[in-house]
Image: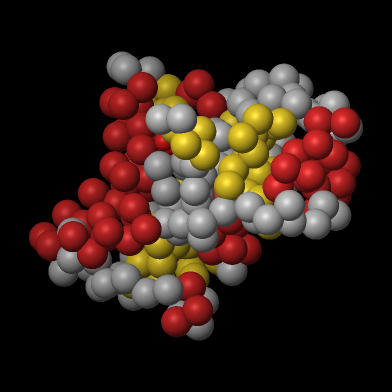
């Protein structure tokens, strides 16, 4: 199976965990896109009655287009289950997210959810986090100074660009990726990053997820 087939397989399986009446957090990314497609089909064919809380403009647009009722995180009392992708997950279920520049909203929705499920293809499962660059969402004002502090600390920051322009998040902030290679102490790094002024949120998701569905060539595995 190619990577897209693995993503589709876990996305479709994850959509079966959604039950009638649920408020569902909808993550962002190419794997989640398959899951939202499958949910849209269930809404259309089975009359599944849900509310989706999206984590990006992209996911909100997709959900509305498929007829999934969409609400903002501040318009719901609680989120029953959030289904999201991830960029890397280690054996302790700690993860890196933000490859799609949406980790700020993803983290807000995740911490307001009763349960969190991540859906990934097998390539995302790692021994040690960090070979995937760690995304930081930063406020543009003062970001060059923040960049210099991160560089001086040896964290190898790079402003994320696309077509020669700095990438802007849905909140009009920049992304700085830390090219660390290996993150040996994720909790300590998270504490340091949490203290940096102008850094709105980092992509380390620690002790957030309850269930991971991994797509392998011989089928999906549900880990919890
Ligand atoms: C977006 C994310 C995504 O969940 C993550 O990048 C995985 O994306 P994909 O499913 O496209 O591989 O964190 O900010």
Where residue 135 sits, quadrant-wise, is top right
| Left or right position of 170 against 144 | left
Name the one closer to the observer, 40 or 149: 149
Q: Return the x and y of residue 214 as percentages of the image width and height.
A: 47, 32
Res. 146 in view: yes
| Left or right position of 194 against 223 | right
In this rendering, the count of numbered labels is: 0
The quarter of the image holding the N terminus is top left
> Which residue in the rendered view is the most extreme toward the left?
45
Name the one closer to the observer, 77 or 49: 77
Q: Return the x and y of residue 124 as percentages of the image width and height.
A: 54, 27
Where residue 157 sits, quadrant-wise, is top right
The quarter of the image holding the C terminus is top right
Q: Return the x and y of residue 16 as percentages of the image width and height.
A: 32, 52
Name the one closer to the observer, 207 or 161: 161
Q: Residue visible at 74% across and 56% down?
A: 198
Q: Residue visible at 88% across and 32% down?
A: 153
Q: Return the x and y of residue 199 as percentages of the image width and height.
A: 72, 53
Name the one closer to the observer, 142 or 136: 142
Res. 224 in view: no
> Vertical placement of 20 versus 10: above or below?
below
Q: Residue visible at 40% across and 62% down?
A: 54
- Colour mode of the rendering: secondary structure
Q: Residue visible at 59% across and 43% down?
A: 175
């Amino acid at each position: 199976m190619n990577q897209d087939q693995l993503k589709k397989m876990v996305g479709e399986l994850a959509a079966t965990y959604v039950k009638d009446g649920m408020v569902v957090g909808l993550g962002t990314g190419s794997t989640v896109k398959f899951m939202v497609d499958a949910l849209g089909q269930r809404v259309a064919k089975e009359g599944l009655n849900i509310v989706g809380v999206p984590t990006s403009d992209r996911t909100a647009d997709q959900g509305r287009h498929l007829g999934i009722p969409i609400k903002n995180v501040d318009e719901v009392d609680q989120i029953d289950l959030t289904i999201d992708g991830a960029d890397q997950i280690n054996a302790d279920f700690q993860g890196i997210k933000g490859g799609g520049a949406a980790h700020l909203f993803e983290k807000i929705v995740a911490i307001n959810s009763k349960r969190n499920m991540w859906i990934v293809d097998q390539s995302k499962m790692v021994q040690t986090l960090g070979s995937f660059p760690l995304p930081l969402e930063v406020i543009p004002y003062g970001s060059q100074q923040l960049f210099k502090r991160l560089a001086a600390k040896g964290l190898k920051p790079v402003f994320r660009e696309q077509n020669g322009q700095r990438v802007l998040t849905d909140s009009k902030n920049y992304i700085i990726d830390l090219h660390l290679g290996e993150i040996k102490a994720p909790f300590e790094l998270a504490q340091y990053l949490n203290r940096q002024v102008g850094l709105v949120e980092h992509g380390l998701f620690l002790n957030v997820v309850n269930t991971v569905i991994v797509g392998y060539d011989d089928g999906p595995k549900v880990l919890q």
